[in-house]
Amino acid sequence: MAETQHRISAWWVLPISAIVWWACGFLPWIAQLSYQVTGLARASDAAAAGIRPLPFTADGAVVGLVVMALMGGLLAGVTARLPASAGAGAGAAIAGTLLGMAGAAGSSWWLAAGATVPGDAMPFGMLVVTVGSGLVGLAAGLLAGIGPAALRGVALALPVVLLDGWLWGLLPGNDVSPIGSWWVLATALGVAFGLCVDGKPLDLLGWLPAAGTVWVLQSAGPALLTVQENIWPGSALTENPLSAAGIAGREIASAALTTDGHQLGAWVVALLLGAAIAALRLSREAGDESELSEAWA
């Protein structure tokens, strides 16, 4: 009862999710623009053409767009958990995220149309990448926020393996590009494992699909970088964007069957951290049930 009383109205989720998708998801882009304005980082050619809510330059921006839009969608989707009604929260989070996408995309397109953009800028293609990645992140966020405990780790798998790129993008002069930082993977994976446990020890079985999904997707970062390397004006990938899925799929499939690049030490740390978080959640749940039993006695 006390928890329900502290829930917010679903109407508040609408603006919150819209703001979260851009302000939090694209925080590295916002930070880099501020670094360039203050002189902490060298201004890029894209920034010289004018400040826009979204980066449109194809060279070096595709992976960053995927990661930032995905993270924004994840965080926006999790806001569905804030209201007492999961259905109303999900509807508000979806509407708010779409509103945020439309606002950022529309303003970026308008600014690009009224100013000279770099020769490798691809506004339409970048918007497609942004919306697609944002929707994937939104689905993951909704599943992680209001879905069953067993599927939370699976929903967080892609954000877990791409999180280090988002974090490195916060540093002056750094692109948003996954480089496989073992401590970021260990921490994020441990938290994902811990969130798979909702109140029953049987929830630990949710670690199996989560671990398998993360293992396969650990090559998602390198796969995205391979796709990005094949993008330039007039390239075959530019003419047929759907072939990007085939390139990424082949990279992921070939890496999923080997232990190369999977950072086994990070997995050990993640399992220990996940076990600690799960134990805390289980003990808290047991304590709450004990207090409730005493109150009814």
Image (tube, grey):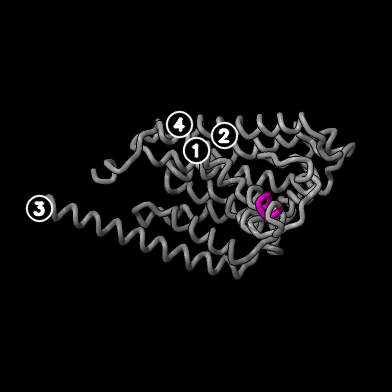
In three-dimensional space, the C-alpha distance between marks 1 and 3, rounded to whole angstroms, equals 42 Å
Which numbered mark, 4 or 3, is in the foreground of this view?
4
Residue 121 appears in the rendering: yes
Q: What is the number of the mark on residue 92?
A: 4
Residue 95 lies, in percent from the top left, at: 51, 29
In three-dimensional space, the C-alpha distance between marks 4 and 1, rounded to whole angstroms, equals 8 Å
- Amino acid type at circle 1 is Ser
Give the labeled residue for mark 3: 297
Residue 26 lies, in percent from the top left, at: 62, 46
Secondary structure at badge 2 equals helix
Front one among 139 and 204: 139
Give the labeled residue for mark 2: 100
Residue 221 appears in the rendering: no
Front one among 28 and 249: 28
At x 23%, y 54%, the residue is 289
Q: Is residue 125 left or right of residue 76?
A: right
Q: Earlier in the sequence, mark 2 or mark 1?
A: 1
Front one among 267 and 128: 128
At x 28%, y 41%, the residue is 4
Q: What is the number of the mark on residue 17?
A: 1
- Amino acid type at circle 3 is Ala
Q: Which residues are magenta?
A: 32-36
Secondary structure at badge 1 equals helix
Q: Earlier in the sequence, mark 4 or mark 2?
A: 4
Secondary structure at badge 4 equals helix
In three-dimensional space, the C-alpha distance between marks 4 and 3, rounded to whole angstroms, equals 40 Å
Proximity of marks 2 and 1: CB atoms separated by less than 8 Å: yes
Proximity of marks 4 and 3: CB atoms separated by less than 8 Å: no
Q: Earlier in the sequence, mark 1 or mark 3?
A: 1
